[in-house]
Image (spheres, coloured by chain):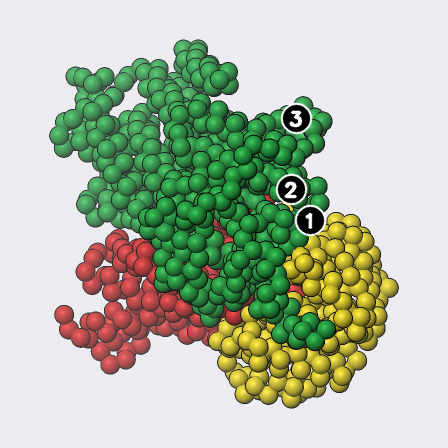
Chain colours: A green, B red, C yellow
Amino acid sequence: MASRTRGWLAIAAVVATGLLLTFAVQERYHHRVLTLVFLWAAMGLAWNIISGYAGQISFGHQVFFGIGAYVTVLLVVKAGLTPWVGMVVAVGVAVLAAVLIGIPTFRLAGIYFGLATLAYPLIFRIVMDWLGYQEVAIPMKREQPGWFMQFNEPRSFDLLALGVLAATLALSRAIETSRLGYRLRAIRENEQAAEAMGVDSFRCKMAAYMLSAAPAAVVGAVYIHAILFIVTPEAVFGLLVISQTLVVSLVGGAGTLWGPLIGAALMVPVSEILDTTVGDRLPGIQGVVYGAALMLIMLYAPEGLYWRVRQAVRSRAGRGGEAARSAIVAPPADDAVASAPTQTVLLQARGVSKAFIGLQALSDVSFDVREREILGVIGPNGAGKTTLFNVLNGFLIPDRGEVRFLGQPVTGLRPSALCRRGVGRTFQVARTFPHLTVLENVMVGAFARDAAVSRAGVAAMAALARVGLADRAEAFPGGLTTLELRLMELARCLATAPRLVLLDEPLAGLSADGIDVMIAMIRRVRAGGVTVVIIEHTMQALLRLADRLIVLDQGRRLAEGAPGQVTQDPGVIEAYLGKRWLARLAAR
Amino acid sequence: MALAELVQYVATGLLVGGVYALMSIGLALIFGVMRVVNFAQGDFMMLGMYLTYFYAISGSVDPLLGALLTIPPFFVLGWIVHRGLLARVTGGGDPQRQMDAQLILTLGLSLVITNATTMILTPTPLGIRTGYATQAFTLGPVLLNQARSYAFAMALVLAAAVYVFLTRTDLGKALRASADDPEAASYQGIDVRAMHGLAFGIGIALVAAAGGLLATYYPIEPTVAGNFIVLMFVAVVLGGLGSIPGAFVGGLVIGLVQSLTLLVLPFQLQNTGVFIVFLLVLYFRPQGLFGRRARTV
Amino acid sequence: MLTIASLGVSYEGLRALVDVSLEVGAGEFVTIVGPNGAGKTTLLKAISGTVPSETGRITYLAQDLGARRPSERAALGIAHVPEGRRVFPSLTVMENLELGSYRRAARAGRKGALDEVLALFPILRERHRQLAGSLSGGEQQMLALGRGLMAQPDLLLLDEPSQGLGPRIVEQIFETIDRIRRERRLTILLVEQRVVEALELCDRGYVLETGRVVLTGRREALLADARVQRAYLGA
């Protein structure tokens, strides 16, 4: 795709600019600033892999920076090992640390994750103090300066730092354009929806964390040799390191290559110049500048300068939503062989029970779902319908009972595993990935079946065409109508090539026309061989659609059967309208 | 190791823990009502220490009284910071993004306060000289430093005052209700946004007062925040995020842990035990001791 | 007292209410019934202001509620007993009740209101020092009702008081609502899923289905109308 090569060309242009600057700049001091810009941009890019793409904001990334610094220097001091090799060892240690930290920490949700990441650098500081490494100086190696990364020529450090930046840019770009990149962004935008589309979020986060640790370690190693020369715990594990990383990434914009580049190019020279000119009279000016930058960005442009500018440019160009849309037309009625339900049981629930504090949500629910049927699940408010879906889909583990799919027990499997086995899901409130295009949203589903980005793109377009949204592929979910959003979710689910789909209130909030389109679409899905289980409150519509109905009330299965039969069932009428209504009805 | 020595460490730990408890209550109140993790909490404490020093130098005000006198100005400061900064950061409606954004905002605020103070005031540590800082009460075999004892007592008094406020006044109950269920609170006519401002003001005022009490025995310098912010965080998480009695107990426990760690480790590693506790709590019981209030049916 | 004209509301990106108009006169008891997802709760939230209205107007005591915040509307004398009760779990029963009369106009009459509420719900007097979170569902519903009454309101909004409660307790709750209606001069707007119990209490009723008013009428008329069932079961 054209945009892919454009991305790599842009990176090449950045590197070329860096080279140009390296050779154009004369003053030793300016070289230092240039080196710092390259290094902090690389550090920001490293942080961006886990915190920008994956959205797991880490306040402790300096752990890997510090490991890079300490390991390389200690290897020089203790073993006389060249830092060129020492760096590789440091990367290995950093990745191992990422695994050890990641395994327990990614279990933590929300704010606890961020708080935990604060603790690790503090622990490392204490450990280094304890081991007696309060101050480790790099020994001068006059005989083989290059071999020990002790260049006399400042340009050499520029080139080294630029090399690190180029490598990190390449790594970031490779991730961005790979399946992992799409999956990470899906996790950031909506982790539950991503899981339902087959993304094993724990594995992906771990992969991202390990990939983000490696460049951070390299940056630390080079930083020590180029700038600091003496390693202290405060300097490499301290607050200023993470502050600079955050400033560079957040000011520029997280979640993109260009953000940390812009942030570093802007903030590093500013703070360095201030430090040199007024730093003596005003010690701490750097900290003030960084702190103020963080505050201003959070107040006025929390997404970062890159995204803010891009948004302004986009809206001026009038893209996304202003072009005339063709009305969504219900697809032609399938006159081909109408797929009739067979007798094969696809999904089986037996004795499923689930309780929450003070509430028995599901009580001994058992039923079968037959291949190619459209099964409606109904029941008054609080009957346990969504809880049931969450159990079938893997978001909840039942207290008792089991679920079997295609004859295999699947109780307790993660949603991503169930998706890979062929159980798809849409949600009551549309769970889109807002910063991805419609096509990219659907591609996340397609990735459940195929790792190749181009093939996933093709599969996603095909799914969009099936639901009639092909011309909205480049739009963003924010610009879609409710009907279009529902269709997009359906397409995304279909792209995972499911055998059975769980549709949670797909008709809610739609106009009469929209309901018609949606019903026709669902019939089409079944005609394509997919079994449909649907929760719905819009009863009149559901009666047109469903082959069979199951009624839940207060967590129990109340009735089952053909729609006409079930709606006349006295037990069901009582559940919905009350015993006294039933009595009056009988009396009439 | 003699029992007397152990008791001494426990006693010192509790005394110090009392002041930690007061610091942590402010943080817990802010989190409980506003769901904000205030990274700048330690820096406001540092400013409180400086104000107390100022009172001592210019008015010969005893720091124990000076600590009390920090409360009004810092309450106002807290209210202004909330209105001007925190209330404007919304993270686009998503509560998780909002918490991240506010954590970053307060991190930035912390950097500004620490470094601006370093710029404007001297980084040399200052101390307030009082008669009782070097004297101790004797309770059997145990020596209780007088400054720490007075600070402990004042911390308890202030904590008790907060308790009374939260349980006996309409405003205090409204604050707790806003923490429990902001929507339901608004149905009772409670202005939840004003409650946020109130919570932040009180939280900042409390930690400033704690700083004043700390100044009776701890040197005052711009970087002092860094030593205590972690202790506060751990105390609050240990007690249960958002629980005020929990934060109080958490503070005492952290004081104890810190003190008892000194039995086995040298002074610069005294926070090791605290970090171990932090990680243990996060992994095995993230809701802390008193977290997870009873649910509504 | 309350007039809603052509109200349109979107909630969580969906159109929850479309062109809804209704009226509640002073002293009236009006019920709104309808199936799950009809928009009943959204309607009450729009009146209280926790959900913004896109189109249409809500007028209370001849004032356009406009963009007033929920706490301001409550101060005007609208008491909302929310769906799912939403008592304050970490506060005691007594504290919950006291907060019911937080609005300025209600503070003077707090003592008297408290006596009345405790007389109405003796179980609350018994448990007054217990944390609200430890009460049973039915007790929490009584507490929520009591809290609403403590505001000495002019308009009482009740959102599905029967939800999640067993039949015997539900009967008790409805009996109490009836008693409240008879003993005070309150205007009540009740939203319920249980048709007969709700309709039997009211003067007039509305039936909502997928965000629209599909039926309205006096109590006896609705109770005899088979179309009510169609709104729930489609047939």
- Residue that carries the numbered disc 1 in the rendered image: C15
Front in this rendered view, residue A184 or A424: A424
Crowding around mark 2 (Cα neighbors within 10 Å: few <14, some 14 to 19, many 20+) is many
- Residue that carries the numbered disc 3 in the rendered image: A319
The amino acid type found where label 1 is placed reads: Arg
- Residue that carries the numbered disc 2 in the rendered image: A482
Question: Is A517 displayed left or right of B110 in the figure?
Answer: right
Question: Is C94 displayed left or right of B212 in the figure?
Answer: right
> Residue at the spot x=71%, y=45% of the render?
A512
Q: Determine which quarter of the picture holds residue B13.
A: bottom left
Front in this rendered view, residue A79 or A154: A79
The x and y percentages for residue A248 are 46, 32
Q: Quadrant of the C terminus of chain C?
A: bottom right
Mark 3 element type: loop
> Residue at the spot x=27%, y=18% of the render?
A151
- Tell me the chain of label 3: A
Q: Earlier in the sequence, mark 3 or mark 2?
A: 3
Distance between the alpha carbons at the discs numbered 3 and 2: 20 Å
The x and y percentages for residue C33 are 70, 65
Residue A34 is marked as none
Mark 2 element type: helix
Q: Disc 1 vs disc 3: Cβ atoms closer than 8 Å? A: no
The x and y percentages for residue A55 are 45, 40
Q: Quadrant of the N terminus of chain C?
A: bottom right
Front in this rendered view, residue B186 or C107: B186
Q: Disc 2 vs disc 1: Cβ atoms closer than 8 Å? A: yes
Distance between the alpha carbons at the discs numbered 1 and 3: 26 Å
- Residue B29 visible in the current orientation: no
> Residue at the spot x=48%, y=76% of the render?
C134
